[in-house]
Amino acid sequence: MPSAVSPIETTSAITSFASVSAKSPDAPKVVAPSTKRITRPKEPIPQILIDEAKATKYEPFDPKKHLNYQPPSKIYSMKEIGLDGHGIAPTAVCEPFPLFTEEAIKQMRAEAFSDECLKDCRYQSSFIKNMIRGMGHDRAPFIYDAWKSPEVLAKIAEIAGVELIPAVDVDIGNVNVSINDENENSVQNWRSSDDDKLSAVAWHYDSYPFVVVTMLSDCSDMVGGETALRLQDGTIRKVRGPAMGTAVVMQGRYIEHQALKAFGGRERISMVTSFRAKSPFIKDETTLAGVRTTSVLSDLYTQFTDYRLEILEERIRAKRKEERGREVARRPFNIPDMRSFLEDQIKLLQGTLDEVYPLDD
């Protein structure tokens, strides 16, 4: 059994400009799906999932009713997995922990499998055959409000060791859908499978600094489904598979990982919500490589460039205030400090520019 969770000090709201400069190692390159344009799945959603969604009566998100938070039994640090000094926070990944009630999960499934979301929000890529994403507040108010709620964000920050907010609205509540074939994905096949057949998603890095993965399926009849982490020395560490309503917080932009296949059960449906640092004074190495061809490009680029420009705006405002204070105190102009600041902002702008381009026809 994992040891009881030890508290990780959460980085409070950062206002010191000195934290802007990103001196830690750069984030790894994200390999994009081979899918070159928006593609809709050919595999239909089983009617039973649609019928269950229609039978669920909508209710607004209420943290008092819909949260079932219990701290994770173990939080693994970046240092423990050989990545000390990498990333934006001390936490690497945690064991699955209870987050949402069964009633909350029913609401999330009902929104994801609604007629409107199935019509407008289904995508596939070379990585994942069936996903529902970019639902937004109009189509999925419960999901949106849950991930924007201060109560949920406080719990996520407690685990991550840094204050986080959803990265962009289009990546709130990405639902990955896998329908199990009774023969191929039976528990008997799990016992006889070799390691090469146990991967549900290839080794990869995420596009965003942090992700929270929430299980929307009943996993009582499943085996497998762990998250595998590849450590710096090449060894593999597994984090146990989740149960319905539980979640995992992971600094996936900096950790090479893969989801292992689950065997048994009717389905495996998980929800991934992506996060970035709340403070503009923490480096942001988000890349759109993993989500560009599974998003409405105008929405994705609008939200991405808006928050990047907001970061730049806040940094410049803070730097000007710092410079005015320096002049009042009659301290000399610090050439190396200003050059470092400008270089960091050029890097931010160049990184933003590199992500914004049209898809090939």
Image (spheres, rainbow, N blue to C red):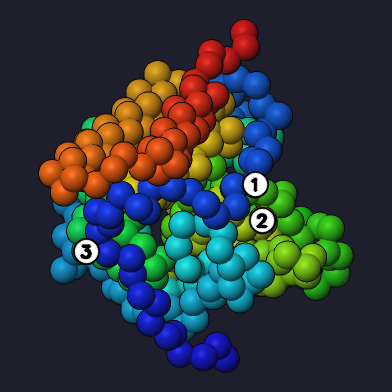
Residue 79 vertical position relative to residue 133 in the rendered view, above or below: below
The amino acid marked with disc number 3 is Glu
Is residue 289 something that shows in the picture? Answer: yes
Which is in the foreground here, disc 3 or disc 1? Answer: 1
**Nearest to N terminus: mark 2 or mark 1:** 1
The residue at which mark 1 appears reads as 28
Residue underneath mark 2: 256
C-alpha gap between disc 3 and disc 1:
32 Å
Q: Which of 110 and 172 is in front in this view?
A: 172
Q: In this view, does 58 lie above or below 45?
A: below
**Side (left or right) of 206 relative to 4:** right
Residue 304: give x, y in percent of width and height.
Answer: 39, 30
* Amino acid under disc 1: Pro
Q: How far apart are marks 2 and 1 (CA)?
A: 9 Å
**Mark before the other along the chain sequence, 3 or 2:** 3
Q: Nearer the viewer, mark 3 or mark 2?
A: 2
The disc, 3 or 1, on the residue closer to the chain's N-terminal end is 1
Marks 3 & 2, CB-CB < 8 Å contact? no
What residue appears at the point 29 percent right and 73 percent down from the top-left corner?
68
Residue 343: x, y in percent? 47, 34
Q: In front here: 203 or 121?
A: 203
Residue at 43%, 47% (x, y): give it. Answer: 21
Q: Nearer the viewer, residue 198 or 171?
A: 171
Residue 235 figure quarter: bottom right
Asked if labels 1 and 2 touch by Cβ distance under 8 angstroms, the answer is yes
Q: In this orientation, does residue 136 appear? A: no
Q: Residue 151 carries which label?
A: 3
What is the residue that sits farthest to the left in this orientation? 328
Seen at 38% across and 47% down, the residue is: 20
| Image location of residue 342, percent across then percent down | 41, 33
Secondary structure beneath dot 2 equals loop
Task: Kindly report which numbered mark, 2 or 1, lies closer to the viewer in this rendering.
Answer: 1
